[in-house]
């Protein structure tokens, strides 16, 4: 085992610290009324039911996402269907639809969807790309030799090949499923709109009233514990057989003949109709029918703020995610894994909790940047670090160890290897990490609401203001703008992965 | 597309109306809040709106940071008119009242806010109880009836809204006129409400304060047993009633008028049933308080006085169909007056105990959707 260079470890620690800082606030508030109170709150029937409901939702969405994503990813990377890369981009695009927008589109069409059904459908449709994208990435790097052997031995049917591929990329599947589960646990927009009584909803209510922060903090801590449990589960699932992947994308890889092509095309089309076409159709209808209430200048200003804040967040996040991603991907050990997984913790915290923590810490410790751009960017970093780390790590761990060994034998230092071998190979991973942060930042709502510089409205805050009063005329243009402009980073992320 | 065109015409007419009321506002407020010596001298004493001997705007200048729980769409024009009239720059942070109150409480004394303009009295009460407000000047407080301002003199109501039972006449011949009639089995599964809406929670708080914890719980349990239908927002409740999805909706009086203004009276079937003399007819207020740690206390007082001036009161009537809280001003066309509504008498500051209300709602199982 080689020791990671210190130049990576220090920034990595800093990044992990950024993610964990909000926890300090949570523990402070939670313990305000004594440990007995904490204990009583946790062991209440309503809390336990809450855990059960939230876990059930997270599990359902993750499982169905995997069953949608793996065949879809295989078809667009290994199957011989027409327009493979077109399908791939289209299938990733639902990432551009904010959960609250999708939920609003569905429930305003069929109010009876409210409850578990609606939350489940909407969250599956907006989160499955978190599985689809990493699986696509891994599949296109799959060593073709194994498949060739399988085909030679008569296992040429699509389903068998999909299962074989799935076994080889189960690490990526597990990572994706984990992200989906964490997303579901921390999502607020969809469960609120669909009126499903999940964790975030109860936490938000307690916080919003501002008068029962203890209960909210305690529930948030329970949520973190669940996230930790998920991380542990993912580690087991990920397994040790990632070595089957080859160094870089083998795009000239053989395509397999898909035995029932019309079924395959229908399958992919169905996903796109529900996840993408439906919300777009709704939004276009609103704009067509009601026009716009705000001027183009208002919309352009909001767009600029969205791009500006999330662009800065992408730059900052990559700076911090890079060391952790390389450490976890290239120098796997107990401590680097811990470092990486510490960043995942905040991913399970609802944005509203991070935001309030940042209000508390910001106004006291960082007063000069409070309610200014830098603090908002820090909040985004804390929120989106895991997304970027995950993307960089998967890219990093697919670089074969042999490259390091050869480089070392040619006289490169440890740092020189990082700089001259690892980083160049990571470039596509970095781009997609940046794109993922931009798209997440443009969709983000609660932290933006609380921490944005006063007077700087973004597309998301404007949209929320209007949808919260069911104002289609006001909401339409912002909804359309979000979908259109978030699609750009989404397309980049999906193509480069 | 005649519908589209008529909607657009309507929108234009609405805009024209807003412009007209803004112009009036500009003229009136020049007199009221201009702080110029000539207007002070020429103004007859009997019509002084806000220009008491110690007009807070007299010496105010600089800039203000306002946390506004009232929507930008509603009050942005008012703030920019204020800036024009007084030369005080206003930076407004818009958000949900509860969230902004939470933000102020979390920020504590370090809050950058000079003024908190809240959608409801409960949020003002919470900030008041945390000791973060400073007293308002008498000239401001005295404009508004004691019932609609803080007993500790540190916030004042700026406009009022009545709780009503919205009903769909095609489904209901005689709507209930008290909250106890809502418990009748004939309404099972037919009442829409918005469990997380601040106005609904304020009503429940009033129920607790006026009837006591036990009776409030009894009513809520009976209400829950009647299987009310939960919606996220009052607007959704209103639309559901109008569409006949539910027969009754527990909302504020102005939701109906918003829909009429947007879609035309001929396209709206729902009607308001007022609840005079009943707890269900609670009149809650939007209001304003000045933060103690403000670095522009004069500016804060000036803004508060501006919002209770005749012109601003007229603005709320025209734009949001709310009740003016200053004596002698008439409500929106055709609405019963506040006296006719005979709302339950309650110290609106008591509506701050939202935490207990939410705990009770949680226990009964009515808070979560």
Image (spheres, coloured by chain):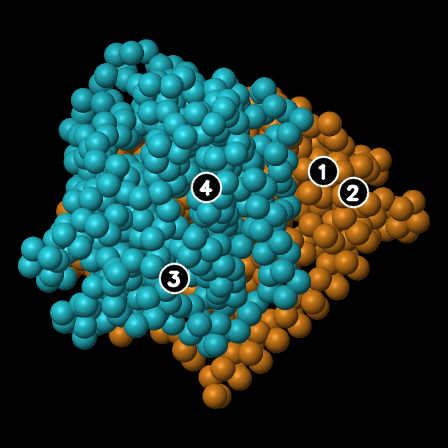
Chain colours: A cyan, B orange
The quarter of the displayed image where residue B317 is located = bottom right
Nearer the observer, disc 4 or disc 1? 4
- In this rendering, would B333 be left or right of B137? left
Estimate the spatial distance between the alpha carbons at disc 1 and disc 2, rounded to whole Å. Answer: 7 Å
Marks 4,1: beta carbons within 8 A = no
Say which element carries label 2.
loop
Say which element carries label 1.
strand
- In this rendering, would A132 be left or right of A351? left
Residue at 16% in and 45% down: A167
Work out whether residue A109 or residue A14 is closer to the camera in this orientation and state it: A14
Q: Residue A10: percent from the left, percent from the top?
A: 50, 19
* Picture disc at residue B88: 2
Q: Residue B264: percent from the left, percent from the top?
A: 47, 76
Residue annotated with mark 1: B64
Question: Which tag, 3 or 4, sits closer to the chain's start?
Answer: 3
Q: Residue A12: percent from the left, percent from the top?
A: 47, 24
Residue annotated with mark 4: A425
């Amino acid at each position: 085992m080689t020791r990671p260079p210190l130049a990576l470890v220090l920034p990595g620690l800093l990044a992990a610290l950024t993610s964990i800082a909000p926890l300090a606030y949570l523990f402070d508030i939670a313990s305000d009324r004594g440990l007995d109170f904490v204990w009583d709150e946790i062991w209440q029937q309503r809390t336990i039911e809450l855990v059960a409901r939230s876990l059930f939702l997270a599990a359902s969405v993750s499982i169905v996402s995997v069953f949608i994503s793996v065949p879809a990813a295989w078809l667009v990377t290994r199957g011989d269907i027409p327009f493979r890369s077109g399908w791939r981009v289209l299938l990733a695009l639902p990432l551009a639809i904010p959960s609250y927008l999708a939920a609003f589109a569905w429930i305003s069409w069929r109010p009876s969807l409210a409850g578990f059904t609606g939350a489940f459908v909407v969250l599956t449709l907006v989160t499955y790309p978190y599985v689809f994208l990493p699986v696509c990435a891994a599949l296109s790097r799959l060593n073709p030799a194994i498949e060739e052997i399988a085909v030679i031995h008569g296992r040429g049917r699509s389903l068998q090949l999909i299962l074989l591929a799935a076994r080889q990329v189960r690490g990526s599947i597990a990572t994706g499923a984990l992200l989906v589960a964490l997303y579901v646990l921390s999502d607020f927009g969809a469960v609120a709109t669909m009126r499903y009584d999940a964790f975030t909803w109860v936490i938000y209510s307690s916080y919003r009233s501002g008068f029962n922060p203890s209960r909210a903090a305690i529930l948030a801590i329970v949520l973190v514990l669940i996230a930790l449990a998920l991380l542990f589960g993912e580690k087991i699932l990920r397994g040790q057989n990632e070595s089957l992947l080859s160094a870089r994308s083998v795009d000239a890889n053989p395509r397999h003949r898909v035995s029932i092509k019309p079924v395959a095309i229908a399958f992919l089309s169905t996903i796109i109709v529900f996840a993408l076409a439906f919300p777009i159709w709704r939004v276009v209808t609103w704009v067509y029918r009601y026009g716009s209430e705000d001027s183009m200048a208002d919309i352009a200003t909001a767009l600029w703020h969205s791009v500006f804040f999330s662009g800065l967040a992408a730059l900052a996040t990559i700076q911090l995610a890079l060391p952790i991603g390389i450490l976890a991907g290239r120098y796997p050990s107990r401590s680097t894994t811990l470092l990486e997984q510490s960043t995942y913790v905040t991913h399970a915290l609802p944005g509203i909790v991070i935001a309030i923590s940042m209000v508390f810490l910001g106004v006291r410790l960082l007063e000069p940047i409070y309610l200014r751009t830098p603090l908002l960017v820090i909040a985004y970093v804390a929120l989106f670090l895991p997304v970027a780390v995950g993307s960089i790590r998967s890219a990093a761990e697919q670089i074969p160890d042999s490259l390091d060994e050869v480089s070392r034998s040619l006289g490169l230092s440890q740092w020189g290897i990082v700089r001259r071998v690892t980083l160049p190979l990571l470039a596509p991973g970095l781009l997609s990490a940046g794109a993922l942060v931009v798209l997440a930042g443009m969709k983000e709502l609660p932290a933006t609401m609380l921490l944005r510089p006063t007077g700087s409205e973004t597309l998301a805050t404007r949209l929320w203001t209007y949808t919260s009063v069911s104002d289609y005329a006001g909401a339409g243009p912002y909804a359309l703008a979000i979908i259109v402009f978030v699609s750009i980073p989404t397309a980049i992320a999906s193509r480069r992965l | 597309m005649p519908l589209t065109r008529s909607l657009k015409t309507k929108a234009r007419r609405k805009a024209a109306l807003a412009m007209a009321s803004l112009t009036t506002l500009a003229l009136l407020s020049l007199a009221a809040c201009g702080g110029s010596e000539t207007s002070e001298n020429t103004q007859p004493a009997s019509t002084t709106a806000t220009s008491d001997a110690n007009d807070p705007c007299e010496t105010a200048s600089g800039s203000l940071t306002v946390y506004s729980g009232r929507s930008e769409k509603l009050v942005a024009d008012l703030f920019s008119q204020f800036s024009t009239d007084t030369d005080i720059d206003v930076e407004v942070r818009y958000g949900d009242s509860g969230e902004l109150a939470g933000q102020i409480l979390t920020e504590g004394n370090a809050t950058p806010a000079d003024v908190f303009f809240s959608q409801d009295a409960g949020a003002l009460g919470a900030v008041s109880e945390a000791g973060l407000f400073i007293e308002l000047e008498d000239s401001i407080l005295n404009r508004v009836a004691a019932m609609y301002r803080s007993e500790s003199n540190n916030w004042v109501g700026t406009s009022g809204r009545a709780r009503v039972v919205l009903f769909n006449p095609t489904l209901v011949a005689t709507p209930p006129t008290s909250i106890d009639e809502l418990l009748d089995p004939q309404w099972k599964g037919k009442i829409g409400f918005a469990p997380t809406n601040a106005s609904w929670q304020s009503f429940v708080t009033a129920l607790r304060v006026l009837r006591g914890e036990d009776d409030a719980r009894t009513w809520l349990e009976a209400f829950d047993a009647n299987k009310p239908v939960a919606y996220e927002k009052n607007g959704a409740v209103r639309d559901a009633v109008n569409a006949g999805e539910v027969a009754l909706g527990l909302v504020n009086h102005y939701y109906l008028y918003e829909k009429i203004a947007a879609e035309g009276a001929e396209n709206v079937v729902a009607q308001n049933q007022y609840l005079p003399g009943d707890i269900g007819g609670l009149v809650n207020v939007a209001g304003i308080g000045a933060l103690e740690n403000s670095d522009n206390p004069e500016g804060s007082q000036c803004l508060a006085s501006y919002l209770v001036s005749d012109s601003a009161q007229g603005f709320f009537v025209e734009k949001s169909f709310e009740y003016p809280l200053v004596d002698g001003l008439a409500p929106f066309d055709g609405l019963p007056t506040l006296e006719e509504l005979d709302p339950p008498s309650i110290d609106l500051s008591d509506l701050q105990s939202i935490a207990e209300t939410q705990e009770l709602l949680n226990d009964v199982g009515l808070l979560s959707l």
